[in-house]
Amino acid sequence: MSATMRQVKVAGLDEVTVVDSRVPEAGPGQVRVEVALAGICGSDTHAVAGHHPLLPPPYLPGHELVGTVEAVGAGGDGGLVGARVVVKPNVDCGECVNCRAGRSNACQTLQWIGCDPSGALPGGMARYVVVPERNVFPVPDEVSDVDAVLVECLATPVHAARIAGDLTGARVVVIGAGTIGLLSVVAARRAGAGVVVVSDPVPAKRDRALGLGADATVDAVSPDFTASVHAALGGPADVVFDCVGIEASIRQAVGVLRRAGTLLIVGVPPRDGVVPLPLFQDWELRVQGCANYTPQDIEVAIAIAADGGLPGDEIVSATYGVEEAAQAFAAAALGTAGKVVIAPASS
């Protein structure tokens, strides 16, 4: 094995490079994964553009991962070697009040593989990545790599749908038809939503949402937005998944919700915004932040994929090699394509 490997680095604003990195060794409690596919997240494109409030460059990206366990550290489970796995990139302490309560996604000292400016937890846009053994989840044989690389993405809306409460028969709106918005349609359907309406300004993205199970779509910049959404739903929404997270989308969400409805903030807000607090109070709206996922959510996402409910071929639009990382990030940043992924093992 070569002592070095090529690795994608977000070196600065608008600067995606490829560098030589040492092949990592798996220590106690760790495994080394040979990465098959690594997705480019919206968080990555926002960070490169300087729009992510919590992720400043430089860092080594790659937190949406599927690959094969190639080595285990001392005392690890040797039976994992050769297993195809997805990686849960959020690393919790397991001991704080939230971890003990089953809310490890809200760990007080949460760290992120592939989203770490300190450099302590490099990502998987390289041939190999080392991760905690407890953070890998086996992938069933019937789940393709293209579907599996979306498991981490799907786990976010699965988590949002779970903490929203009972969605059986609910009227649901999804604002934004990027990857997370599309997968919110999948998650809401899995959770029993009765009718799902998706909004986006891009016609092709609205069409993709219909193909993935939305009942109707609405142009996000329509002057009749609220009336159009209510007509498509048959009334006001019970729950809104805001997968954009800006002031305008939050105002749209409040406009379509019923009194005592639930607003799920799923998209990462790039900045503070002015929101209609009087309506939050008077309508007794529930505003719920939704941050990543727990192991339970990862397992549900894998089960959805195993059941054929995660059509990766309809969402993943392009695959690039490591040396083409700058082109891949540029394509992902356009926002009109589907999911863009990098294939390190084939580079």
Image (cartoon, rainbow, N blue to C red):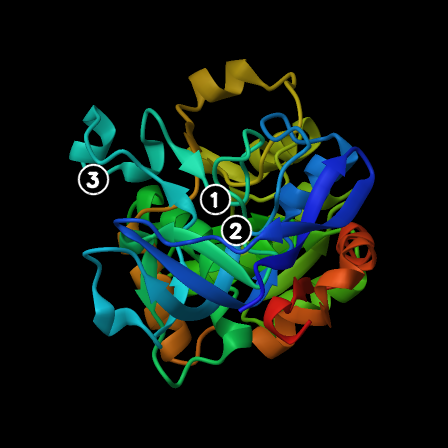
Task: Give me the residue at 58% from left, 27% from top.
Answer: 54
Residue type marked 1: Ile
Disc 3 and disc 1: Cα gap in Å?
20 Å
Give the foreground label among 3 and 1.
Answer: 1
Looking at the image, residue 82 lies above or below residue 42: below
Image spot of residue 57 (x, y percent): 68, 32
The foreground one among 73 and 300 is 73
Snapshot quadrant of residue 137: bottom left
Residue 227 drawn at (x, y percent): 67, 45
Q: Is residue 32 left or right of residue 221?
A: left
Label for residue 102?
Answer: 3
Residue 50 lies, in percent from the top left, at: 75, 30
Count of marks, rendered view: 3
Residue closer to the observer: 23 or 203: 23
Which residue was labeled with disc 1? Answer: 113
Residue at the location (58% across, 54% down)?
Answer: 181
Instruction: Kindly report which numbered mark, 2 or 3, lies closer to the viewer in this rendering.
Output: 2
Q: Secondary structure at mark 1?
A: loop
User: What's the residue type where badge 3 is placed?
Assistant: Gly
Q: Which residue is mark 2?
A: 63
291 on left or right of 196: left
Q: Where, by quadrant of the figure, is residue 69 drawn? A: bottom left
The numbered mark, 3 or 1, whose residue comes first in the sequence reads: 3
